[in-house]
Amino acid sequence: GAVVSQHPSRVICKSGTSVKIECRSLDFQATTMFWYRQFPKQSLMLMATSNEGSKATYEQGVEKDKFLINHASLTLSTLTVTSAHPEDSSFYICSARARGLDQETQYFGPGTRLLVL
Amino acid sequence: SQQGEEDPQALSIQEGENATMNCSYKTSINNLQWYRQNSGRGLVHLILIRSNEREKHSGRLRVTLDTSKKSSSLLITASRAADTASYFCATGYSSASKIIFGSGTRLSIRP
């Protein structure tokens, strides 16, 4: 149980375009979803926390107008990288905290590798 | 920002040996978790230890927490090739808060 999926698993786009990444909780309702970014051989850096039906809370230094987060339902959150540039190339990982289950545990998606040319 | 620093950054040991990774953090926490990440993949939750606990076991994993020293250790006993991965500690400030990841340890198990 507690499976989180991400789509797409990898995407290549041209500089200046926007890319949307989906994060879905498959067998549970997610009260909170988190978005992380990970550069090669580095740790995960939290970008934002999103609660269903409310605006996302962004970490310091993360541009909310560039990284648009929509948590439209209890099973889906999306991250849109707007006007992507090569420096946005990274591994984006989402996680979800489940309603009713252990509130301390986050369940992670498999990640989306973004390459901006 | 990162809450935790891990050492060593990289560790290479022979299969069958024990591997110990350490995590230090800066501010008071509610819980500390350990995750594993295989190269280019998502994270797998290994174990969670709460601030009022000192030691926890799960299979070949043993985690300790010393809140006075603001440090934790992860011990993997009788290592296997499949244990090759990066290991991260992550600290939580309350039971349902965000978690902040440490810098990670890259573990390689030599056959």
Image (cartoon, rainbow, N blue to C red):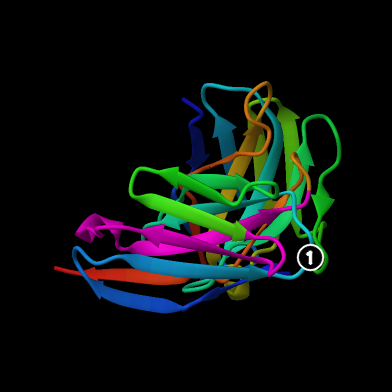
Please name the residue shown 86% across and 41% down the image.
A55
Tell me the residue that label 1 is attached to: B27
Residue A16 in percent (x, y) is at: 65, 66
Residue A18 visible in the current orientation: no
In the picture, residue A86 is in which quadrant? Answer: bottom right
Identity of the residue furthest to the left in this view: B111
- The image quadrant where one finds the N terminus of chain B is bottom right
Residue A36 in percent (x, y) is at: 63, 56
Q: Circle 1 — which element?
A: loop
Compared with B14, A35 (above or below) is above
Magenta stretch, residue numbers:
B66-93
Residue B46 visible in the current orientation: yes
Q: Is residue A6 left or right of residue B98?
A: left
Rate crowding at label 1 as few (under 14), some (14 to 19) or many (20 or more) other CA atoms within 10 Å: few
Please name the residue shown 51% across and 29% down the image.
A2
Please name the residue shown 83% across and 49% down the image.
A57
Residue A75 in percent (x, y) is at: 63, 26
Q: Is residue B74 magenta?
A: yes
Compared with A116, A65 (above or below) is above
Q: Is residue A28 left or right of residue A65?
A: left
- The image quadrant where one finds the C terminus of chain B is bottom left
Q: Nearer the viewer, residue A97 or B20?
A: B20
Q: Amino acid at mark 1?
A: Thr
Please name the residue shown 79% across and 65% down the image.
B27
In the picture, residue A62 is in which quadrant? Answer: bottom right
